[in-house]
Every structure is written in C-alpha cells, then in structure tokens.
Amino acid sequence: MGKPLCISSDSHIVESVEFFEPLAKLFGDRAPHVVTADPAKGPQLDLGNGKLGIGLSGFLMANVDFASGEAAKLAPRGYDLARPGCYDTNERLKDQDLDGIDGEVIYPSVLFNVYQIEDVEIVKASFRLYNDWIADYCKEKPDRLFALAAIQLYDLDDAIIEMARAKAMGHVGVCIPATAPPDRLYSDPWYDKFWAAAQDMNMSLNMHVFTGATDNHGLPPAMKSGGYALASCGVMFTCADVIQSGVCERFPGIKFVVTEFETGWIANMLKRLDWGYVRGGGARTQGIPMKPSEYWRRNFMATFEDDDLGIMTRSYIGTNTLMWGNDYPHGDSVFPHSQKVLTEVLADCTPEERYEMTVKNVVELYNLPYKLEGPEQARLNQKTVSA
C-alpha cells in the first residue's frame, strides 16, 4: 500500500525583487517595488506612493519559532532566508516530499497589498505580470504545482478577459480581494457579470488573508495592531454580504474560497446568520429561499492549517467545505511538520473526514490530476496514516 495522498490547498510563491523590475520600466517610481526602509524590519513592498506593505521576511520563515523572538532577529536577512525550494521547482518537490505532501495550490505573497493601489492600470499590469510569472513556475511540475491567478475587480471587462486568459494558461482559480471597497460592496449587482463569468468558467474566487481592497481588512485604523488577530472579522462581513444579498442564489455554481483566516469563527457566524434569517422572517422577508448556512455549504470553501477549534465544529461548518493547507514557506507555515500537525488536529476525525479535508475537496474543487479513491480504500489508507 503506497503513501496516502495529501495535498496543500494553501501554499505560496514569494515574488522576488527582480519580479517587479518590468513594472518600474512601465511606471517609474509609481510602480510597486521592494525597499528596505527600516533595516531591523527587513524588506517591504513600497506601493509606489511611500505606503509600505507587509514585511517580506516573514514570508520566508517556515519552521521559525515566532514566540521565541527568533523571527525578529532574522527579519533583517530578508530574501537570504529563502529556502532553495522557494524558486527552484526541483528543490520544492524535495520539500513537498519532506513534508509528506503530493501537490500544492499556489497563492502569491508580496502582491497581497497591490489590491490597495489606487492606479488601476498599475494593478492590472502587476497582476498580468504575476499571472505569466507563476504560470511559468508551475508549468515545470504540472502534476504537483497548481497556480492561482491574481485579478482586480475595478474594471470588470478587463477582469473577465484576464480570468479567461489565466484559465487558458492552466490556472485553477483566481484571487480576489477578501474585502471589497466600502463604496462598492460585493452585494452590488455591478459585480454580477463577473460572478457569471467565474461561474461559467468554473473558476473559484479565492480570498486570502491580507488581500483586501481595504487596509487592515476594513478594521478601524485604531485597531491596526489587532488586524492579524481579528482578520476574520473583515472576511466574515464579506461572506455575510455575499450570502444575504443573494449572490449565491443568483449564481448557484459559484465557489468562494476563504483562505488562511483559519476556521474556528465560521460555525458561530453561520449560526448567527441562520438565527437572523429565521427571526427576520426567512424567505418571506430576507430575499433568499435557503438559510445562510445552506449557501455556505454549497458555495464556500475555507482552508485551515492547525485550527483545532474549527475541526471541533466541523459537523456544523461542513467537512465538504474545509481544505487543509501547509502555508509553505511562510512564517505561519506548519512545514515541515504537516503530517504530525494533521495527526494531532484531526485526531478525532474519521478516516473518511481526513481524506475529504486533505485530498477529496481540493481535487474536486480545482479538478486536479489525481485519481480519487473509493470510500473503502480511502478509509483504509487514511486509517493507516492516522495510526
């Protein structure tokens, strides 16, 4: 019996300094570029207007103990922290083998803050460049590396064209901001032609932590220090807005993927949305015929790394909506201890549930080139790995 499959639904590439050079040729100082404004913090992305993004060193700190103070000492090293697998696909496959996984869905890293650049032409050019760049990286190992494209939602005609181009290149889904601009929330029918195109193309809409069109996930500026801990509050509003406004009712085949916000908050959100739906008069007054939790289980997926609270409430969230990811090579990553972490976090899960969250859901969502096992074989294999 071979090793059971295990696929990360949330892994990353870390864009190099050189990646941004073509943008500088097009837009000069207005282009996003990597700077080191504070040597103690290491490199950051300047959005072209002096506003600085997330410290980049943390994107390269897999297997670093953040609680010990080690991360602060390493931050000045920046890109020198990168494992060879960050840029060499052969080395990356070695890291997959070390971590006990067979494939990864790849998100960007440094581009997270580009969604907040006001010049739409710069955003478009940045994302086109990235979509080409990540396609070239993943095509070297097409059976183990699967790219997600980055898409802006200010010019929807262009967004639809770029999404179609990305699909043609082999991208398995697209990344959109986790929080919409305050003056045009996702409940606005203005977005409907984009939702329709995503549904028709069978392209998932992935909302990763730190990718909001708003700063700090839409939280008040005074809560800047709490943005990391409370990030789920921003995407929670997005989920509720999309569900309650009827987006999922109008586009039943659409798939939103909530990524790296962990999952412990989801059950409480769904329960309260259902309470509000029932107490508010249900379909008669709410404008949607199903409870919000039913739309969640049909139209949403969420990723987790080591969130035991989410797993405790999996029956309410729906195991069909949960996908595990290792977050390689970021500082939040569970690499290279993924199998140990999975054994601990999923200790109370059945073998079938483990298979669903580490293989089946991600393969079916992205139509990945893996043969799914039958229920009995999956149960036996996952029972073996869990033992």
Image (cartoon, grey):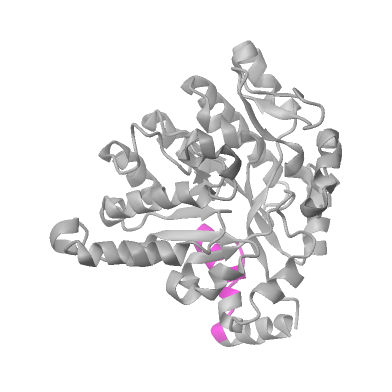
Please, which residue is most extreme toward the left here?
284
Query: How far from the left and from the top, in percent, is residue 67?
Result: 78, 53
Numbered circles on residues, count: 0
Dominant secondary structure of the magenta stretch?
Answer: helix
Q: Quadrant of the N terminus?
A: bottom right
Is residue 367 in view? Answer: no
Of residues 5 and 208, the one nearer the viewer is: 208
Query: How far from the left and from the top, in percent, is residue 114?
Result: 56, 30
Residue 340, quarter of the rendered image: bottom right
Is residue 356 in view? Answer: yes
For this view, does 102 lie left or right of residue 296?
Answer: right
Q: Is residue 128 magenta?
A: no
The part of the chain drawn in magenta is 355-375
Please, which residue is most extreme toward the front here?
222
Q: Is residue 295 above or below residue 223?
A: below
Q: Is residue 237 above or below residue 355?
A: above
Question: At 48% across and 40% down in the image, what residue appears?
Answer: 219
Residue 358, quarter of the rendered image: bottom right
Q: Is residue 71 above or below residue 181?
A: below
For this view, does 296 lie left or right of residue 215?
Answer: left
Question: At 78% across and 65% down in the image, what residue appears?
Answer: 337
Q: Is residue 374 magenta?
A: yes
Question: At 74% across and 49% down in the image, what residue appears?
Answer: 331
For this view, does 209 lie left or right of residue 94?
Answer: left
Query: How far from the left and from the top, in percent, is residue 45?
Result: 67, 28
Residue 54, quarter of the rendered image: top right
Q: Quadrant of the C terminus?
A: bottom right
Query: How far from the left and from the top, in percent, is residue 287?
Result: 18, 56
